[in-house]
Amino acid sequence: MTESIIGAGNPGASDGSVITRPARIAVQNVTKSYGSRRKPTLVLDTVNLEIAQGEFLCLLGPSGCGKSTLLNIIGGFLTPDSGSVTIDGRKVERPGPDRCMIFQQPALFGWLTALDNVMFGPRAQHKVDASTRDRAMSMLDTVGLAGTANKYPHQLSGGMRQRLSIARALINEPQVLLMDEPFGALDAITRGQMQEFLLNLWAEHHMTVVFVTHDVEEATLLADRVAVMAANPGRIVHLDSVDVPRPRSYDLIDSPEYSRVRMQIRRTIENGGHS
Ligand SMILES: Nc1ncnc2c1ncn2[C@@H]1O[C@H](COP(=O)(O)OP(=O)(O)OP(=O)(O)O)[C@@H](O)[C@H]1O
Ligand SMILES: [Mg+2]
């Protein structure tokens, strides 16, 4: 490992924005097996990870190394066999509105308009008041969908649908955004636009982000730190910070620090998880 577990976290939004509050995630000695009790398969082996308030952390690794499993445990959708996840010292035991999950395929309600999709969370939590509709409209504006409030998901492009699912998450003011290969299904151009969109969104609101990808370039472009996982059993084998100033764009992708981190990660992956 090339650095301490806790990265240089960023402070919360300085403009007093209500969108997010800072969070800190501690994954401690998490193990998880699938299969029968007689013949379990160890999928996560003693995973330890701390994520600072407002940090953007990428979980990177080959297919099947347990990235989604770990993300689901952080989200409270899965329970570890042993170990724990805490957010600001509180143990995660179930999903909660403080953590929002964004999947590769946007989870939207096809029979609801874009606006009603965004309003769904507050409605489900009985948190609708006079300002909710305006907040939902402003969320649509934030993700560049101001003109689509009355459109249905099937009338939107893939990138627009993914931005709508992000707006749907943000209205709940999550402390933590958990993203599982959110741009994996998009074409290269839309994917690049979405990466820049997410960078800008995060620069504005500084929510804590755990972003799963198997794309080294994507991880180094987006992350404060990259945690590289290896498979069989799934574990974190390398942790590196990407000390490139923000705001970032594709112009920086050939900077020496990017190249160093990319090379190191590639070497780790090629060496089967030994950095
Ligand atoms: N519900 C399940 N039952 C049994 N095995 C499972 C289950 N979910 C995942 N696995 C196994 O656990 C391992 C890790 O799966 P996981 O989905 O976490 O990997 P991943 O790193 O997200 O992979 P990918 O990049 O392909 O999405 C895999 O070997 C997978 O087959
Ligand atoms: Mg996965």
Image (spheres, grey):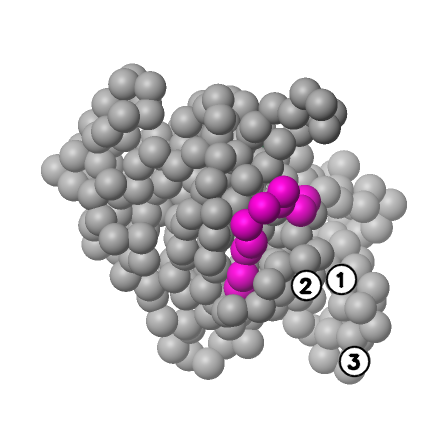
Check if mark 3's residue and mark 1's residue have beta carbons within 8 Å: no
Is 88 displayed left or right of 155 in the figure? left
Q: Is residue 80 magenta?
A: yes
- From the viewer's perspective, is residue 219 above or below residue 248? above
Q: Specify few, some or many for label 2: CA neighbours under 10 Å numbering under 14, 14-19, or 20 or more.
A: some
Magenta segment range?
A: 78-87
Label number found at residue 121: 1
- From the viewer's perspective, is residue 219 above or below residue 117? above
Q: Specify few, some or many for label 1: CA neighbours under 10 Å numbering under 14, 14-19, or 20 or more.
A: some
Q: Which residue is mark 2?
A: 97
> Residue placed at 55% from the left, 50% from the top?
83
Q: Earlier in the sequence, mark 2 or mark 3?
A: 2
Q: Specify few, some or many for label 3: CA neighbours under 10 Å numbering under 14, 14-19, or 20 or more.
A: few
* Gap in angstroms between the C-alphas marked 3 and 1: 13 Å
- Secondary structure mostly seen in magenta is strand
Q: Is residue 176 magenta?
A: no
Q: Quadrant of residue 14?
A: bottom left
Q: Secondary structure at mark 1?
A: helix
Viewer-nearest of discs 2 and 3:
2
Q: Nearer the viewer, residue 125 or 137?
A: 125
> Residue placed at 30% from the left, 57% from the top?
7
Check if mark 2's residue and mark 1's residue have beta carbons within 8 Å: yes
- Measuring from the top left, give residue 67's x and y in whole percent: 52, 35
Label number found at residue 129: 3
